[in-house]
Amino acid sequence: MVKVGVLALQGAFREHAEVFDALGAETCLVKRPDQLAGIDAIALPGGESTTQTKLLATSGLKDPLIQAMRDGLGCFATCAGMILLAAELHDARADQQPLALLDISVQRNGYGRQVLSFEAEIDIDGMPEGFTGIFIRAPRVTRVGNSVEVLASLGSDPVLVRCGNIWAAGFHPELSNDLRLHQLFLNQLATTEGV
Ligand code: GLN
């Protein structure tokens, strides 16, 4: 069985844990470095990336998390989680250093004040029917590196990207009452991990 940790420092972590539970994964909350042991993947939830960045440092999780992901830990990041993973940020706070684990550039709150939150139907590679993306002060992906595959776009903007077993969405699949994207991630993880 796949074991998924959900980073539980701030934001919509309970919702992710509920979805992974409902899909039959073994799920645990991660607040301390020792809780990274034994997990196959980590979910980085939406929330407030500035606060999450600070808490990653003060909890002592930042460096062990970077090391674990470099060593192959899978990752399912949404919204603020996508911001944490990016290689380069625009409109971030001056002291907000991303983890640089995924070669994308991201503009925080990139959809402007007038449409800070919206829903949009998106087509996801590997999913036969459309998916409702819930975007809440969403990051806008402004550059995707060669190693990164785009699995869904909104107009010309990538909104779901993947590099190996690291996935990042600009929207909130954990809030749409639709388990299919988490399931797709677990399926891929099981294939690559041989779980
Ligand atoms: N705009 C938020 C940030 O910068 C992310 C919003 C979200 O996760 N819904 O952290």
Image (spheres, rainbow, N blue to C red):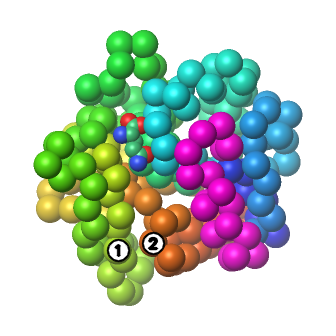
Mark 2 crowd level (few <14, some 14–19, many ≥20, 10 Å Cα): few
- The reply to whether residue 145 is visible in this rendering is no
Residue wearing tag 2: 176
The magenta segment: 7-24
On the image, the x and y values in percent for residue 21 come to 73, 70
In the rendered structure, find residue 114 and report the number of the disc placed on it: none
On the image, the x and y values in percent for residue 181 come to 50, 71
On the image, the x and y values in percent for residue 117 come to 27, 55
Mark 1 crowd level (few <14, some 14–19, many ≥20, 10 Å Cα): some
15 in magenta = yes
- 142 or 114, which lies in front? 114
In the rendered structure, find residue 132 and report the number of the disc placed on it: 1
- Label 1 sits on what residue type? Thr
**Could you tell me how far apart the alpha carbons at marks 1 and 2 are, in whole angstroms?**
7 Å
- Label 2 sits on what residue type? Ser
* Residue at 68% over, 18% down: 58
- 83 or 54, which lies in front? 54
**Is the N terminus in the top left, top right, bottom left or bottom right quadrant?**
bottom right
Q: In the visual, does 147 lie left or right of 47?
A: left
* Residue at 85% over, 48% down: 38
Residue sticking out furthest to the front: 114
Q: In the visual, does 79 lie left or right of 184?
A: left
